[in-house]
Amino acid sequence: MIKNTRFPSYSKVHQSVIRVARQSFAPVLCLAFTWLNLHAAPTVNSEAIRSLARLSQGFPRAELQMYRGDQAAVEVLKEMLQDESEKSAWPTVVTMIGYLSPFDNALANRLVNYLESSAPFRDCPSDDPESFRTRDRIRKTIGREEYEPKLNVLIALGYMLAKPPEATRSATSRLAMRSYLSDGMGPSFWQTRVRWFGNNAYMSTSFRNQLLSRNAEIGFHLAASKEFASRQQRGPRSVSYSNREAGLVPANPNPR
């Protein structure tokens, strides 16, 4: 039968060394952990972000404020915009991306390429839109779930541009995007740029261009507003709401 073996305890010398080490290094370790906690990237409740984006009647400003400028939250939204199972939330997702994200030239370019092409967001590059236009020759008809979020890109750009610039190097890009919204207020601007057609009977090319020019006007005024904070109280407006308010959407926009 094996007897219980009692392992030898630390010697008095070892115990003294351990005691001194604890007393010497504890403050240093405490400071190190405090610094890491202060500088660590904040965690984002991705499910809370997804729930806000799924709301059919908009989302409260108070809950959005805690995520403004949070790149992790923007990444969650970009993932949603590439997830086919989240397609019904895409119009709100696009607007939220602009509402929460600081101006990002690569992201702005990708959103413009997404708006103008028939491709889904996951297939759109962040290349200069002019360069992408010359390469992308595909023109096709897409459904309402695909084109509604594209229409909201112009409002998203307005929210993005309304935030103070974070770097001087973005000044040229910001000016180009402001000009894009300004020029887009004319319906003819979209005739050759947009490479998709709506599959609904009411979504003619002319009506599509009207919707785009209306949303470009909304985006432009958001970008130019010096009182953006007061506009935030109502939260981002979806394409459906703003266009119905403007009288551009028929009473039954999705006859089935």
Image (cartoon, grey):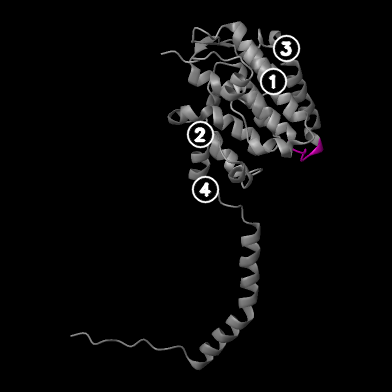
Q: Is residue 102 visible?
A: yes
Mark in the foreground, 4 or 1 = 1
Q: Earlier in the sequence, mark 1 or mark 3?
A: 3
Residue 186 at x, y percent in the picture: 72, 12
Is 82 displayed left or right of 104 in the figure? left
The type of residue carrying mark 3 is Gly
Q: Which residue is mark 1?
A: 216
Query: Residue 4, located in which quarter of the rendered image?
Result: bottom left
Query: Residue 19, located in which quarter of the rendered image?
Result: bottom right
Residue placed at 73% from the left, 39% from the top? 229
Q: Earlier in the sequence, mark 4 or mark 1?
A: 4
Residue 230 at x, y percent in the picture: 72, 38
Q: Earlier in the sequence, mark 3 or mark 2?
A: 2
Q: Earlier in the sequence, mark 1 or mark 2?
A: 2
Q: Secondary structure at mark 3?
A: loop
Q: Which residue is mark 4?
A: 45
Q: Residue furthest bottom?
A: 12
Mark in the foreground, 3 or 4 = 3
Question: Cα distance, mark 1 to mark 2?
Answer: 24 Å
Q: Is residue 229 above or below residue 237?
A: below
Question: Cα distance, mark 1 to mark 3?
Answer: 9 Å
Mark in the foreground, 1 or 2 = 1
Taken as a whole, is the magenta stretch helix, strand or loop?
Answer: loop
**Boundaries of the magenta span:** 163-168
Question: Tag 1: Cα neighbours inside 10 Å, few (<14), some, or many (≥20)?
Answer: many
Question: Tag 3: Cα neighbours inside 10 Å, few (<14), some, or many (≥20)?
Answer: some
Q: Which residue is mark 3?
A: 186
Question: Cα distance, mark 4 to mark 2?
Answer: 14 Å
Q: Which residue is mark 2?
A: 80
Residue 115 at x, y percent in the picture: 61, 20
